[in-house]
Image (cartoon, helix red, strand yellow):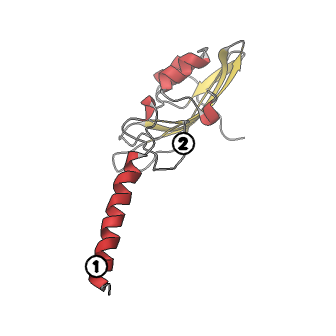
Amino acid sequence: MVTLKRVMGLLIVTGAVMGVSGNAFAAKGFPGQAGCWAALPGEDERPEVTCRSFTEDLLKSLEKATPAQVTSILGVPGKDHKPTYFESANKTPGAYNGYVELTYTAGHVSDLSAVLTQVQPNGMASDEKDYQWGVSKAGCSDFPGSKKACDTSN
């Protein structure tokens, strides 16, 4: 006859083994995710999630970049493995999180749209900031010191 104590012991051992084996199959992620994103076993690796802070300098580096340059800068391939949509998941105070959408013309970024918040020391998000750039349009930025703020009143 199996006692309750043995059943509980078997469940604990089984759970421990499953936990260890589950970790062996955990998604490895992408280079740009080190430190801020880890997919759970069997979960989509979310190829659009990066740890890179979407600073003004980083966004400027994406202007006119090729798809290969974009994926190298961000360390992830982009949503659906296409370098057109990215999200940041950096939890470090001062980091800029949000999303970036890119459009390409003749193999280079021709339009960039970003909506961001900054991680505050208490872990909360700041007010939303926008960053817009395009080859054939005037850009704008809500980063401090910007010459032209984005008009979000429409």
Say which residue appears at 33% left-offset and 78% top-offset. 7
Q: CA distance from mark 1 to mark 2?
A: 56 Å
- Where is residue 17 shown, x and y percent of the image? 34, 59
In the rendered structure, which amino acid carries the disc numbered 2? Glu
Residue 31 position, x and y percent, is: 43, 29
Residue at x-position 46% and y-position 28%: 55
Residue 128 lies, in percent from the top left, at: 54, 42
Q: Residue furthest front?
A: 1
Picture quarter with the N terminus: bottom left
Q: Is 133 positioned to the left or the right of 136 in the image? A: left
Q: Callout 1, which amino acid?
A: Arg
Q: Is residue 71 above or below residue 96?
A: above
Query: Does 4 sit above or below residue 48?
Result: below
- Report helix, strand or loop for mark 2: loop
Residue under numbered circle 1: 6
Of mark 1 and mark 2, the one earlier in the sequence is 1
- Residue 52 can be seen in this image: no
Q: Comparing marks 1 and 2, which lies closer to the viewer?
A: 1
- The numbered dot on residue 128 is 2
Q: Are marks 1 and 2 in contact (CB under 8 Å)?
A: no
Query: In front here: 26 or 66?
Result: 26
